[in-house]
Amino acid sequence: MMRKILTWQADRSRLTATGGAAVLLTLLWLGGCRSVPPPPVPAPEPVPAVHRGLIVLASDNSPAITGVARELALRLSAGDVESHTLSADDSRNVALLRRVQSSDRTRVVAIGLPAAKLARRLDGKQVVFCQVFNHENAHLVTPWMKGVAAVPPAGESLRAWKSIQPGLTRIGLVTGPNLKGLVAEARAAARAQGVELHSVEVRTDKELLYTVKRFGAKVQGLWLVPDNRVLSRNVLRDVVGHALKEGKSVLAFHRDLLAIGAMLSAESDAGDIADTVLQRIGQAGAGAVLPGAEMTPLNRAEIRVNALVVSQLGLSLPAAFRDKTHAH
Amino acid sequence: MLIDRLKRLVATVARLPAPAGHGRARRSLVSRLLGLLVLGAGVVYLVVNAGLWWTSTRLIETSLERQAARWVAELDELGTPLFASRRSRHLTVIDDRIKHFPEIAYVRYYDAGGRKALGHYGPERDLDIPPPTDEQLARLRQMADAEEGEGETRRLTVPLRLEDNYLRVLAPIRIRSIAQDGMLNFSLKSTPAETVRVIGFLDFGIAAHHYRQEFVQNLINGGVAMALLFGFVLWIGRRLITRALNPLTELQEPLARLARGDTEVTVKSEGDAEIAAISDALNATINAIRRRDETLRDMAERDALTGLVNRASFTRELEQEIARCAAGASSAVFFVDLDQFKYVNDTLGHAAGDRLLVQVAQLLTSRMRDRDVVSRFGGDEFVILARDVDRAQAAEIAGSLNGLMRDMHVIEGEQVVNVYCSIGITVVDSGRYNVEDVLAQADMACYEAKTRGRNRYHAYEFSAEDRKKIVTDLAWAQQIKTALRGDGFRLVYQPIVRLQPGGEEYHEALLRLRTRDGDWLTPGAFLPVAQRFGLLAEIDRWVLANAIRALGEARRTGRALVFTVNLSGESFEDPGLPALVESHLRAHGVPGTALILEITEQTAVRHLERAGQLIGSLNALGCRLALDDFGKGFSSFSHLKHLPVNFIKIDGSFIEHLHRNPVDQAMVQSIIQVARALGKTTIAEFVQNEETLGLLRRSGVDFVQGYYLGEPGDLPPPHAEVA
């Protein structure tokens, strides 16, 4: 079956070098000024000094990890970055940890959970981690270790959803425990879009399915966030299938879910992550403490749409999505 | 082939006992086919029911398995809140749900350890059911850990026997989660593997009796429906079979009639092609039987030459007429004997004699009425029964017959011959005399007419002398009959000697009748009376039976014997003679070649056509024929060419004076030469001296017989060859 998926790049701002501009844009974003049209992409600027002597720890060679590492490399000169990939052998990882610890480079970027966990054991280094979902469970945030969100900005995702389904007023969000930050961001985004958010915390995939099936008419759509603790493939299939059967739209966290009935997906962009990481690294001072928020949100959301589901739900696809239609 | 089979069928039917309650009643074909139909239908019914039972059981089991899978999924989901918190709670939603399914007896949820029940539901929730065993729990955990596959069941079905049969279904309640870093490279495919954890167990029981009752009820309903259907099919089948076999059933009545001898029956040719073919064949068979019966009846009741009724048939008619006359009627019997018949025979030949007999028969028939009976008793004797005539009318009829005969001229070539007749009349006007008396009276009256000059009639008048003669003849007839029933006859054997050395012994079997004084009479003394009373054929049968028996006994001692036996002219009219000879030969183990049957030349020539058939039938048995008394009377060598006889016995009149009569010598020489030319063996009888024997030897005769060579007597020991 051909599924038409539209991609909409929410390239609201392309933060590159100047930390002031990044801070300003971050504040604007937090203030809900998302209606501001994106500025023109500035010309590449020289690598700031703070980014020199950076160590990048990659958890593995998966695309999600290497993609961010590659974007970081694009933005830095070759001599500024020392990249390492974790091994399946813990002893090697320990040796790697020692080498990083003994290195005179003080700033570390950890991509993925294993790298973040390893980096948390570093002493006297300033660490920014990314591509980690549910960082709360791993207690990764410390005074010297901060993170960049793994999920795209909730506001961008919800804005795209609302633009496709203007009548959307009630949505349900089912998460695992301890995702207060994410829930708060989602609630704020919903409020900004005039949407009522029903948030339920569950502990298992079984509970998630049970909860979704009992939402009933309380919600018009489901927002699936990537919480591995309460998600399983079967439950995802059941949830998406159930929602579609009940005429509910689903905002998914991955494009693969479009194929089983989700209406749209919102994913993070590796370049956006790299920009945000470099921005966060740029905030590092001379001391051991990494100042700033525990988690820095992303700026862009890569939206994909299943036009067939849109049609089945009786919606019409906005022109902004239509001209980017492609077969999937 | 079909005709033969049908004949056998008719014969079988004929052997069947009479239908009206004799013997064991036979089942009809329709009943048998219907029985087979019912039996077949019953077997099919049982097989179908068994198949229905088996199929239904499998379907129910399959359905139950699928239903169990759905229940597992649904109950698993319904019980989710029980595992969402540590607080014990009762979920009414489960009760509400399963109350629509009476087959679910109970539902229980156990914790991850499988021991603590988190909830009890269902109408029989308080059943005393133990928790899953450790082994069952281990298997369930193993099932939970396995990856899902096509058609894979993640449950354990266990028969549970309590008060009634329950089917217990156990299933693990599990949760799954994606690996902690699995969201980065999320995929709906099976890798990377998910974490599976069993958080509890589902235990529910299906009341099998519920299904059983439903199943049995459905089976009964289905069985009744099928029984009705089969009943309907049987009813249709019965009608179809009955209709199809109706033409066959209708054959019963005509076949039964046919078995009773009624050949006037006709079978309807209808129904299917096979049955119509049978009907047609039956009709053809019946027609053939009818024609054969008519032929046999004619042969048995009519004279082959003239077509008039024969003695036996006339006797029956006369017997009935005597009974009628005893009631007051009056009829007459005419005994007609031709006066010049022997002259015609001798001068013009037997063929002319036969033509004369036919002409006389036509004349007599034309004179008499249809209700009268004209018969030929043999030779030139005709007997007529004229019904409802008195003495005067009888005399008038006899006179007219004499007149007609006088007016009749027999033209043979250039010769014109007048034939007259003598007629004896007797009037039957009471039941005082029996058939034999009446015939004897008419015979004597005829004899009297001949005595008085021939060409006249004479009415029987009772006289003591006539009565005495009748009594004498009747006594002879009675003695012959007694002899036939007992031991009044005996056979004596006269040797027939082969003039060339070697070969078998030949003897002629000759009949003797014992008198009351113990003497033995030769046939010349009693055969005329036997012929008059129609006993010759019966005497022939006696002679044949005893001669063949004696032949069998002698041959069993090792003697290579051959007997010659004389046959009368009446045996030519006995169609059962060949079968009789065959049965005696077979009974005594005698080959047909050991029997030579002698027929007189006159008899053979008179019954030329019949003689050919008879000789052919006897030859087929291996028997040989001898032409006796050849040369006596008006013989013709040409007859020898047409009669398939093996031996010629030269009449004794040529042999008796052979030694002194050159004419006889020439005649004998001629006969022998002709016989040789025809390949026939010659026998000279009446050899009484050595001189005659020498002449015969020189003439080249093959066998000789006579008192000079051996008198008739008991079977002698093996004799020496004649030198």
Image (cartoon, rainbow, N blue to C red):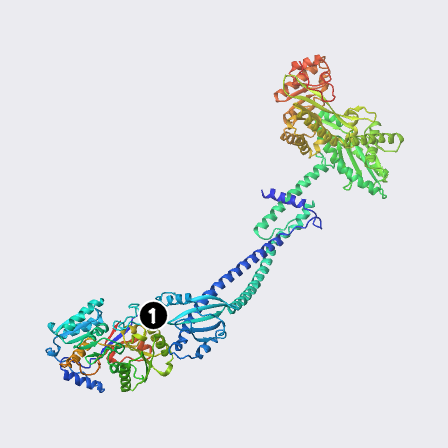
Q: Is residue B526 left or right of residue B195?
A: right
Q: Position of residue A320 (x, y in %)?
A: 24, 80
Give the x, y percent position of residue B400. 81, 35
Q: Name the foreground residue: B638 vs A12.
A: A12
Position in image of residue A54 (x %, y %): 14, 75
The residue pinned by badge 1 equals: B196
Q: Position of residue B553 (x, y in %)?
A: 69, 27
Give the chain letter at badge 1. B
Residue A168 against residue B234 in the figure, above or below: below
Q: Label 1 amino acid?
A: Val
On screen, residue B266 above or below A190: above
Left or right: residue B133 compared with residue B230: left
> Does B274 sit left or right of A238 as displayed?
right
Q: Residues within 10 Å of mark 1 (few under 14, many from 20)?
A: some
Which residue is located at x 62 percent, y 31 percent?
Answer: B620
Residue B337 seen from this side: no
Badge 1 marks a residue whose secondary structure is: strand
Residue drawn 71% across the image and 50% down it: B21
Q: In the picture, which quadrant includes the C terminus of chain A?
A: bottom left
Q: Quadrant of residue B2?
A: top right
In the picture shown, does residue B159 fall above or below B498?
Answer: below
Q: Nearer the viewer, residue B166 or B361?
A: B166
Residue B517 placement, left or right of A301: right
Name the image quarter holding residue B111: bottom left
Furthest residue in direction right, as rendered = B464
